[in-house]
Image (cartoon, rainbow, N blue to C red):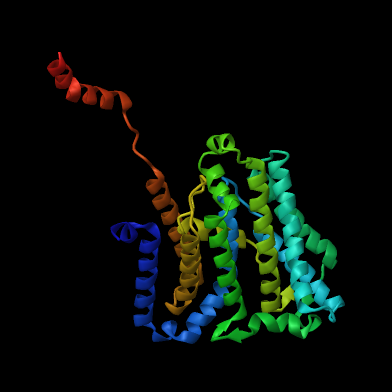
């Protein structure tokens, strides 16, 4: 029980609870169910993208193209809705997921097969994917009036008081937990991130795990692309621009180590929830938009510092320890003599 209270996830959950209570005491509207439901709906995409990014970071990688993947996948789904409105909604969503999966597989192949550093690959594909939207759109955009009714209605549907994106995020979170904790491939992601050499000796392929991680991230980005475009009713090249930094911040705040091999589903979700609360609370507290970015940046920087200090391990002096043990057992050798 004491280990639970000292865990990072518990401490972050406690901070979130105290923050919500403090903001609610300042403005009771903040803790009303409708406001909380709206905040969770707005943060649902961040929940899923943060989990996708976590899987990549576990392998000591980084995916800077998740937001561009989201934009391109969502744009393709919107085009399907625009030109083929009679297509079932499931196939429209599947089109977005398939495009996202393909883009993720391209990232994974370039990194795992060619050995190009992840930050270089994903920085390049970020620009390529954004440029592909401009080429497909011809400089235009898809508006809500050009999308199908069912295409836009699904993300706004509610069940038991929660919007569809929240339920999708819950389902995706459960799948991620099961995958990372109960499957060989999921545990392999932790292994290659924690110690690639030992993982290779255990028969775990680093390239295969990297390809798997980026493919998963791509598929989830494609799903989020549909939800983003359908919810906001517009698809163009600059949607979710810069959102990849928010996704990485959610992972870092949630305790995911940039060095790989460390991270939990619960911690990542709490990190995303924390950012969602901060983004919702700052306008409620009537803080200037110019200060909002500075405060959010300060929170991220503090999380990075805390992570770095938590991961630091004191060096063990082997020889002095051996000398001490030798002195402690010297009387036993004299007694035997």
- In the figure, residue 220 lies in which quadrant? bottom right
Quarter holding the C terminus? top left
Which residue is nearer to you in this view: 218 or 180? 180
Quarter holding the N terminus? bottom left
Give x and y (percent) for residue 141: 79, 72
Q: Is residue 236 visible?
A: no
The residue depicted at 73 percent of the width and 76 percent of the height is 234
Give x and y (percent) for residue 134: 80, 63
Which residue is nearer to you in this view: 184 or 255? 184
In the displayed structure image, the side of residue 50 where residue 82 appears, left or right: right
In the displayed structure image, the side of residue 103 where residue 25 appears, left or right: left
Q: Is residue 169 visible?
A: yes
Q: How many marks?
A: 0
- In the figure, residue 15 lies in which quadrant? bottom left
The residue depicted at 44 percent of the width and 59 percent of the height is 298
Give x and y (percent) for residue 191: 53, 44
In the displayed structure image, the side of residue 110 where residue 259 appears, left or right: left
Q: Is residue 287 above or below residue 6?
A: below
The residue depicted at 53 percent of the width and 36 percent of the height is 198
Which residue is nearer to you in this view: 29 or 335? 335
In the displayed orientation, state which residue is furthest to the front.
Answer: 336
Q: Is residue 256 above or below residue 31?
A: above
- In the figure, residue 320 lies in which quadrant? top left
Q: Is residue 131 above or below residue 280?
A: above
The residue depicted at 68 percent of the width and 48 percent of the height is 211
Which residue is nearer to you in this view: 305 or 225? 225
């Amino acid at each position: 029980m004491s280990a639970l209270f000292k865990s990072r996830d518990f401490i972050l959950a406690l901070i979130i609870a105290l923050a919500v209570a403090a903001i609610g005491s300042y403005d009771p509207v903040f803790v009303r169910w409708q406001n909380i439901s709206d905040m969770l709906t707005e943060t649902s995409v961040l929940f899923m993208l943060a989990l996708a990014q976590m899987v990549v970071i576990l392998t000591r990688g980084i995916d800077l193209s998740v937001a561009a993947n989201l934009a391109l996948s969502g744009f393709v789904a919107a085009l399907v809705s625009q030109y083929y409105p009679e297509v079932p909604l499931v196939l429209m969503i599947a089109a977005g997921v398939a495009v996202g999966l393909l883009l993720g597989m391209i990232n994974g192949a370039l990194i795992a097969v060619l050995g190009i550093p992840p930050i270089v690959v994903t920085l390049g594909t970020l620009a390529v994917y954004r440029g592909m939207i401009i080429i497909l759109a011809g400089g235009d955009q898809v508006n809500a009036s050009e999308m199908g009714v069912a295409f836009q209605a699904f993300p706004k549907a509610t069940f038991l008081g929660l919007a569809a994106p929240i339920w999708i995020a819950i389902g995706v979170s459960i799948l991620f937990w099961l995958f990372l904790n109960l499957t060989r491939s999921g545990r392999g992601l932790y292994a290659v991130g924690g110690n690639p050499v030992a993982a290779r000796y255990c028969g775990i392929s680093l390239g295969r795990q990297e390809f798997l991680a980026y493919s998963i991230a791509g598929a989830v980005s494609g799903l989020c692309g549909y939800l983003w475009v359908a919810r906001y009713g517009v698809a163009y090249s600059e949607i979710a621009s810069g959102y990849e930094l928010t996704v990485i911040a959610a992972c870092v705040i949630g305790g995911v180590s940039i060095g790989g091999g460390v991270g939990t589903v619960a911690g990542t979700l709490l990190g995303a929830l924390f950012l969602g609360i901060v983004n919702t609370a700052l306008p409620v507290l009537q803080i200037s938009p110019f200060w909002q970015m500075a405060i959010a940046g300060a929170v991220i920087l503090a999380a990075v510092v805390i992570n770095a200090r938590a991961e630091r391990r004191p060096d063990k002096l082997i020889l002095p320890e051996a000398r001490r043990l030798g002195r402690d057992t010297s009387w036993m050798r004299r007694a035997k003599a």
